[in-house]
Image (cartoon, helix red, strand yellow):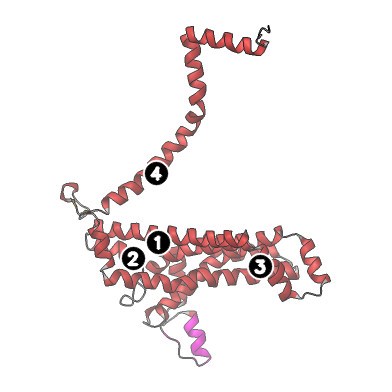
Amino acid sequence: MSIDRATPAEATQASSSNDSVGDPSASRGIAFRRIEPFLYLLPAVLVFTLFLVAPVAGTVVISTTDWDGIALDSASFVGVQNYIDAFQDSGFWMSLWHNIVLIPYFVILPAVLGLIPAVLVHQLKLRGARLFQAGLFLPYIMPGVLIGVVWRWILNPVFGPVNAALDWVGIDAPSWLGDFTWALPTVGLIGAWAAYGFCYVLFVAGIQKIPTELYEAARLDGAGLWQEVTAVTLPGLRREMAVVLSVNLILALRAFDVIRATTNGGPGDETQVLALFMISAAFNANEVGYGTAIAVLLAVMTLVLSVLVLRLFREADA
């Protein structure tokens, strides 16, 4: 017949458990240790809730009301009617189309303009690369309003240097920002100029992470500059490409400051985008509920498209 004997550790644990049952302070200590990790997270959770969750929830609630933005007692619940009105509003679809037209300018063109100098600086080992990098990154950190004001002066049809140079070589230049045909592409080019510095810096950082052995192996196989770029550089920059495209896509969909400072949606409605249309509906027409519904739709579209871009590159990376 065998007798089970507890080990010293088990005996100590059993003894402490028995003591904690009869000792209220020990029970409180055990309970505190259980919730202690959550107490460290509490400040961050409060800040996140106060400055993100609460405003988003409030925005969604306001989007379901008919409110003039003045007196709260004048707001009336309308449900999803504001969203229905948005889908039936030709101004909404026109503004969305302008955002879509700006996507190649804000997304693809800055990526190309940032990739070319990044590859040249790396492949040709140019001197002064850091100074060159700082100069290219400068437009990205400039406020959008300042960029718009500067480019509005540069493209001024009367005394702007661009039209003066074109007139000097005998080219009849348009009024750019005041032309119904050229206004939207011009705004897109300004946005591309403002964003390509970010793409350049990110691509330079990504190229520096690519193992040099891959370039040496490509050279041993007789690869030229173009083959190195297509076979080594571009595959190595897949993750940076995903970040660049997703960030620039967000910029294209929420484009506001540069357009407000250059054309303010004109001439006519040729550069009217969703952000301007939303502000016009909310503050100029005193339809805050309707403008907020447009803001919610814009946020949802931005989130969905960004997730799709990131997932596309993630599957390609896998």
Q: Residue at x 60, y 13 (%)?
A: 13
Q: What is the three-letter code of the residue carrying label 1? A: Met
Left or right of residue 23, residue 56 in this image: left
- Residue for badge 4: 51
Q: Which tag, 4 or 2, sits closer to the chain's start?
A: 4
Instruction: Measuring from the top left, give residue 140's x and y in whole percent.
Output: 53, 62
Q: What is the three-letter code of the residue carrying label 4? A: Phe
Q: Nearer the viewer, mark 3 or mark 4?
A: 3
Determine if residue 142 is in view: no
- Compare residues 137 and 36 and report the one nearer the observer: 36
Please give the range of residues in magenta.
162-174
Q: What is the three-letter code of the residue carrying label 3? A: Leu
Residues tagged 4 and 2 counted as in contact (Cβ below 8 A): no
Q: Nearer the viewer, mark 2 or mark 1?
A: 1
Instruction: Measuring from the top left, give residue 131's x and y in whole percent.
Output: 66, 63
Left or right of residue 294, residue 233 in this image: right
How far apart are the alpha carbons under marks 2 and 3? 36 Å
Residues tagged 4 and 1 counted as in contact (Cβ below 8 A): no
- Residue for badge 1: 301
Q: Is residue 49 above or below residue 113?
A: above
Q: Nearer the viewer, mark 2 or mark 3?
A: 3
What's the mark number on residue 234? 3
Q: Residue at x 45, y 87 (%)?
A: 173
